[in-house]
Amino acid sequence: MEQVTTEKKGHPKALYLLFFTEMWERFSYYGMRGILILYLTKSFIEGGLAINEQSASLIYGFFTGFVYFTPLIGGWLADRFLGQRNAITIGGLTMMVGQFVLFGINTQFGLYLGLFLLIIGNGFFKPNISTLVGRLYEEGDPKRDSAFSIFYMGINLGAFIAPLVIGLFAENLFAVKDESGKILTYGYKYGFLIAGLGMLLGQVLFNTMAKKYLGTIGESPAKAKAAAAADNQPAKVDMPLTKEEKQRVTVIFILTAFVIFFWAGFEQAGSSLSLYTDKFIDRNVFGFEIPTSWFQSVNPLFIVALAPLFSIFWTSSMGRKLTTPVKMGLGMILLGIGFFFMLGAVAERGGDNHDITIKASLFWLVMTYLIHTLGELCLSPVGLSVVTKLAPVKLASLMMGVWMLATFVANIIGGFVSAYVEALGAFAIFATIAGFVIVLGTVMIALNKPILKMMHGVR
């Protein structure tokens, strides 16, 4: 029987171990992601790789996409052979090496090798740590949604700190400046070094404390656990899914199909929004020009501030009345509303002109991130939680990989969208995304009853 350090009230201590492990992994990932598009597009003399913006957007999109494809494979391997804890360690160490490659080999070969290792490592790490969170709670435990909101704070605490620290190293401490203070060469490679050290710290934390706080949870493959639960009769483990289980798995695929379009819009933050901010947003505050990479911290800052309120709200009497499809539909609608503020930025500049001396107010960008954050909190932690509720035990990590498949497809779509901002214009792109996701969110809310019926008691 699995054992974990628990408390009669509140959440088990293991949740906070997973919180900090995920925090450092996200520090590593979002730190490098915050400077990636800039590293790709800056000239050689500026410390970049001099790749044109359209190609860089596609590289960014395919990288961030495949980061969420490999969890499908990593989840399956963990369920069948490795166990979640071994998979997390393999993934963490692989990502650490990937960051060090980006630091040490500043060529396109180094870029592709480093990104490849990050993609593979994330495939082992990402689905399995989320699955472990779900396994800390008994079926039907109302604290599970709250736990995922807390866990989500760990994700975003790392994502908040990373661009600030790594941006400071890359765009200040290790940047070469002229006498007037203008940056001549950015220290992007040192940003990748700090990201790798963050990943190392997270792995040390996890591997030294997992036994104490997780007990035996995640040590053995889920298939082996299912066999033990079936009185060591493997035939039961390999039996086909029941009708109820099949319908619940179908719901996971339905929800995954919808959220593809949420993430395709949301992930513009690291590509088209980042490039737009770099060129057309007035980043000067009280005489200080805010580094572009720092804006990657705005969304996670709002997450850390607002997630506790959402965690409380979901467990309140009013919050419990909202079903998963309704929460997620609201999230998509809020994403669309957020893009209306970027339309305000474009309008303030007089439309899609290319004059970089005409800047839009910082207000539009901050409001976009705020509304997008509200949408994300309605959709992402809720989605993580419901997948752990709906997935059959023997397919738990695999189904988490399926959920993350949405982000794989979304980032590739998002990369193509970003690549065409220059040709089609920011106004047309932002307006199209806004209208499309609002319609989809409305459709999801309308499908609430039939989806709930297929969930068989899970809300």
Image (spheres, rainbow, N blue to C red):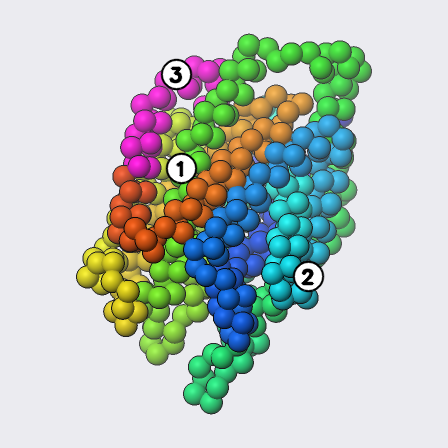
Q: Position of residue 179 (x, y in %)?
A: 47, 89
Q: Quadrant of the N terminus?
A: top right
In the rendered view, would you say 368 is above or below 451? below
The stretch in magenta equals: 436-459
Instruction: Check residue 432 for magenta coloring.
Output: no
On the picture, is 251 further left or further right than 14?
left
Q: Position of residue 297 (x, y in %)?
A: 46, 58
Instruction: Return the disc, 3 or 1, that comes first in the chain's sequence.
Output: 1
At x 58%, y 24%, the residue is 391
Residue denoted by label 2: 100
Q: Is 419 in front, or is 143?
A: 419
On the picture, is 432 further left or further right than 201?
left
Mark 1 element type: helix
The amino acid beneath tag 3 is Pro
Numbered badge on residue 261: 1
Which residue is the extreme one toward the bottom? 179
Instruction: Evaluate if marks 3 and 2 touch, with contact meaning CB atoms under 8 Å apart.
Output: no
At x 32%, y 42%, the residue is 433
Q: CA distance from mark 3 to mark 1?
A: 21 Å
Mark 2 element type: helix
